[in-house]
Image (spheres, rainbow, N blue to C red):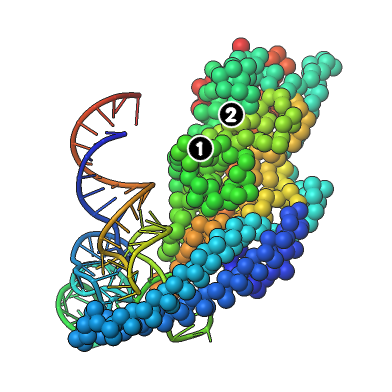
RNA sequence: GGAGAGGUGGCCGAGUGGUUGAAGGCGGCGGUCUUGAAAACCGCAGGGUGAAAGCCCCGGGGGUUCGAAUCCCUCCCUCUCCGCCA
């Protein structure tokens, strides 16, 4: 269950409003309310009958122990009366089961309402919270009054032998980039850089997760049912290729009750990410801005509810550090309700400036899910030993997604002569300061 | 992939179809004792739902039965051996 029956009953209006603000259908809220009422009625009836049955069974046991003939008329009569009750229970149980299945299905479809201070609306309602660095110009001044034009990343990369999109298309299909030579090394260097900073400077515990998950995990983080069509499915084994490390990593603590002193728990994980990008055909077809497989370092945090708001700001900062070290200009955008996913309560996107294509590219999305995912995954914590378990809060954020970061790097660090300068932080990882043909 | 063993409370581990939501041990919490601690002794402690009574939960699902942790089916997982293999 994602929103919880308690909240459904007490706060239906907020849920309805939240769905509408996100551009989703609020009908699921009313359907859930209806099913919940029906369920409670059936449950009351069947519980009463079960109590009756339990008494009767106990009576039969006592009678036999008290010396009654198990095959005698007295016991047979008791047994017969109980049979009728059991049959009625079975009927109710069947109906209850179908109601509960329906209810669960409907609950999974109720969106997580955005925090109240999130701007309502579409893209125009997004708020640029802050910017960092000086966006590089597309046309750059050169020596002696000359000027040069920055090329898009795919041209830079292909010319330097760092990327072979044709090979990727041949081997797998379009949207599966083949990095080579310094391009491949750059991938490895970035992954290492990001993981190193997060583990050494930000205190994350490094995880190297499976790249394939089962349906329960995909449901836990909310990919199912909302984004099921965006995932690659291994049908034979009923498994899904991960669209982000968020899925395997957040599910680590599914069905657990964590002690207070363990919180917050903060993981950082590298994984390849697979996305079908269904419905995005024809968008960003050139280069590596929208691909079916990319690499990403993801931060995941499990927090006490009262700490999740501050944690979101902190996580955002952890991602920003990486862009600052790479010397890439970026802006932080607070997403408006209509731009958010159904599971998030508050989301910041980090957008990096790519002067070749002259666009801001989303390289990170940092979100507070509050209790929405945790309830689906049944992840709880205890304030103190012996206290009632409570649902905790989960957050995650990219730190960072590689493909678009690489695109920005290529476009920012290209030189007029066609070579590529390696950002200082990456030199130790790459072993060179300049990449040339 | 083949053969076998097993999945019970935070952990280990009993469990006969009938007050066993579950013995016992360890661990945990509280107390007595102690200058303090240890030891010893006493006591308290699972989760869900519900206003409560109650109902449900012994890997998941289904079945047999008046009644299932206990019997049957099925799926999943763990372990051991064999085969294959980075």
Give the answer, above or below, for where A420 lies relative to A91.
above
Residue found 82% across the figure and 18% down from its top? A147
Residue A112 in percent (x, y) is at 65, 58
Q: Position of residue A343 (x, y in %)?
A: 63, 54
A286 and A146: which is toward the camera = A286
Q: Is residue A409 visible?
A: no
The answer to whether A180 is drawn above or below residue A23 in the figure is: above
Which chain is home to disc 2? A
Task: Judge whether A100 appears above or below A320 on screen.
Answer: below
| Residue at mark 1 to residue at mark 2: CA–CA distance | 45 Å
In the visual, does A288 lie left or right of B57?
A: right
Quarter-of-image position of residue A312 = bottom right
Q: Residue furthest top?
A: A437
In this picture, residue A431 sits left or right of residue A337: left
Name the chain under label 1.
Answer: A
Q: Where residue A47 sits in the image (x, y, percent)?
A: 47, 77
Q: Position of residue A262 (x, y in %)?
A: 43, 60
Between A52 and B41, which is closer to the camera in this rendering?
A: A52
Determine the secondary structure under disc 2. helix
Q: Where the C terminus of chain A falls, by quadrant?
A: top right
From the image, tell me which residue sits under label 2.
A424
Task: Tell me what residue is drawn at x 60 percent, y 26 percent.
Answer: A176
Q: Residue furthest right?
A: A145
Residue at the spot of label 1? A235
Vertically, is A16 above or below A130?
below
Q: Nearer the viewer, mark 1 or mark 2?
A: 1
Q: Residue at x 36, y 79 (%)?
A: A80
Residue A418 as seen in the image, left or right of residue A38: right
Whether residue A220 is visible to the viewer of this picture, yes or no, is yes
């Amino acid at each position: 269950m994602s929103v919880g029956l308690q909240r459904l009953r007490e706060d239906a209006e907020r849920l309805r409003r939240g769905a509408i603000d996100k551009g989703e259908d609020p009908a699921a809220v009313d359907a859930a309310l209806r099913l919940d009422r029906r369920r409670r009625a059936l449950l009351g009836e069947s519980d009463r009958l079960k109590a009756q049955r339990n008494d009767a069974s106990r009576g039969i046991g006592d009678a036999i122990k008290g010396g009654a003939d198990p095959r005698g008329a007295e016991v047979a009569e008791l047994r017969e009366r109980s049979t009728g009750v059991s049959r009625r229970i079975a009927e109710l149980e069947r109906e209850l089961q179908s109601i509960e299945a329906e209810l669960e299905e409907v609950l999974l479809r109720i969106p997580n309402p955005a925090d109240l201070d999130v701007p309502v609306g579409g893209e125009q309602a997004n708020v640029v919270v802050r910017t960092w660095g000086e966006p590089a110009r597309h046309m750059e001044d050169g020596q002696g009054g000359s000027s040069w034009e920055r090329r898009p990343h795919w041209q830079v990369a292909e010319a330097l032998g760092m990327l072979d999109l044709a090979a990727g298309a041949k081997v797998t299909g379009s949207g599966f980039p083949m990095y080579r030579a310094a391009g491949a090394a750059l991938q490895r260097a970035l992954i290492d850089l990001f993981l190193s900073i997060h583990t050494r400077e930000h205190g994350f515990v490094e995880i190297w997760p499976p790249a394939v998950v089962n349906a329960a995990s995909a449901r836990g983080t909310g990919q199912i049912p909302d984004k099921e069509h965006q995932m690659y499915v291994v049908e034979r084994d009923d498994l899904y290729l991960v669209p982000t490390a968020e899925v395997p990593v957040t599910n680590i603590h599914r069905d657990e009750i964590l002690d207070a002193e363990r919180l917050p728990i903060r993981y950082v994980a590298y994984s390849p990410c697979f996305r079908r990008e269904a419905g995005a055909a024809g968008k960003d077809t050139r280069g590596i801005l929208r691909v079916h497989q990319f690499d990403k370092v993801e931060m995941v945090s499990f927090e006490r509810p009262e700490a999740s708001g501050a944690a979101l700001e902190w996580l955002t900062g952890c991602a920003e550090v990486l862009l600052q070290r790479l010397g890439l200009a970026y802006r932080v955008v607070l997403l408006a309700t209509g731009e958010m996913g159904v599971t998030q309560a508050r989301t910041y996107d980090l957008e990096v400036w790519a002067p070749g294509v002259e666009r801001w590219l989303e390289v990170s999305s940092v979100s507070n899910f509050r209790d929405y995912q945790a309830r689906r995954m049944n992840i709880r914590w205890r304030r103190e030993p012996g206290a009632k378990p409570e649902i905790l809060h989960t957050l995650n954020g990219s730190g960072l997604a590689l493909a678009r970061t690489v695109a920005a790097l290529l476009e920012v660090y290209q030189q007029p002569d066609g070579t590529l300068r390696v950002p200082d932080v990456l030199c130790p990882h790459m072993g060179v300061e300049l990449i040339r043909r």
